[in-house]
Image: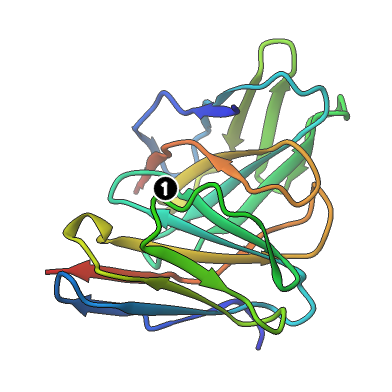
């Protein structure tokens, strides 16, 4: 069974600074898909960034980027120039193929401080 | 609609009662997922539909939980003989096919069993 571990229950960062959220996973699959989702207090999960394990290049979406280390089974999220609106729960998620369900970590609560 | 719609937003029910939670996915999305999220936890998979059929119901905790998607669009999660431990936020998501496909989430139904 696949598992996703987020070892930081809570983090805080000053506005405009950079923060990195960690995520590790366990799988025996060779190709799979990794995601970071954001959940603000409104409860709606929003996709932040995604990566296919087959691709070596780290994904980037504006201020959000990942550091994907396949051998180490690590998929960390870096948020640059943090904004107050980035305050939310962040969940790392894994999918091993096709439309199989996402497996989520327990989340990291990020607070951006003015 | 523009996004995934879940009704009701909140539901309070007495222990032992029957409840139905509705999910209206994005039009054209063949995959539909139900998750349960307890306080401070990541979403846990319950059941996944591909079209009208349940492709994977391995996450349903027991036979009090059942879900249908009769016409391949709207889905209903049904819980019989509710227990206080069923209290959680129930999330629905839909997506197109493909491993990297984004799962779009609704805002969830907060179920409270008293």
| Percent coordinates x, y for residue A103 in the rendering | 57, 40
> In which quadrant of the rendered image does the C terminus of chain B lie?
bottom left
| Percent coordinates x, y for residue B30 in the rendering | 77, 70
The answer to which quarter of the image holds residue B47 is: bottom right
Q: Which residue bears the numbered disc 1?
A: A89
Which residue is depicted at the point 80% across and 29% down? A53
Q: Does A67 appear above or below A16?
A: above
Q: Does A81 appear above or below B21?
A: above
In the image, B78 versus B89, the foreground residue is B78
The answer to which quarter of the image holds residue B11 is: bottom left
The answer to which quarter of the image holds residue B71 is: bottom right
Say whether residue B86 is left or right of residue B73: left
Q: Does B75 appear above or below A59?
A: below
Say whether residue B36 is left or right of residue A103: left
User: Can you name the residue that lies furthest to the front here?
Assistant: B63
Which residue is depicted at the point 74% across and 11% down? A71
The 10 Å Cα crowd at callout 1, few under 14, some 14 to 19, many 20 or more, is many
In the image, A92 versus B71, the foreground residue is B71
* Element marked by disc 1: strand
């Amino acid at each position: 069974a696949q598992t996703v571990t987020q070892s930081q229950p809570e983090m805080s960062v000053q506005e405009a600074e950079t923060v990195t959220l960690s995520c590790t996973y366990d799988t025996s699959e060779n190709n799979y898909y990794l995601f970071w989702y954001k959940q603000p207090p409104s409860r709606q999960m929003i996709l932040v960034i995604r990566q296919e394990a087959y691709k070596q290049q780290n994904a980037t979406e504006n201020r959000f980027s990942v550091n994907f280390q396949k051998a180490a089974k690590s998929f960390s999220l870096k948020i640059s120039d943090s904004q107050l609106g980035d305050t939310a729960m962040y969940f790392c998620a894994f999918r091993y193929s096709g439309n199989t369900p996402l497996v989520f970590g327990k989340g990291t609560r990020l607070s951006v401080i003015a | 609609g523009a996004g995934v719609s879940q009704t009701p937003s909140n539901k309070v029910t007495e222990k032992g009662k029957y409840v139905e939670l509705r999910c209206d996915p994005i039009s054209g999305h063949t995959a539909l997922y139900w998750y349960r999220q307890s306080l401070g936890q990541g979403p846990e998979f319950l059941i996944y539909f591909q079209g009208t059929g349940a492709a994977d119901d391995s996450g349903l905790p027991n036979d009090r939980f059942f879900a249908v998607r009769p016409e391949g669009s709207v889905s209903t999660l049904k819980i019989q003989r509710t227990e206080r431990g069923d209290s959680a936020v129930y999330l629905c998501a839909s997506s197109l096919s493909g491993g990297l496909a984004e799962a779009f989430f609704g805002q969830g139904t907060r179920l409270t069993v008293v």
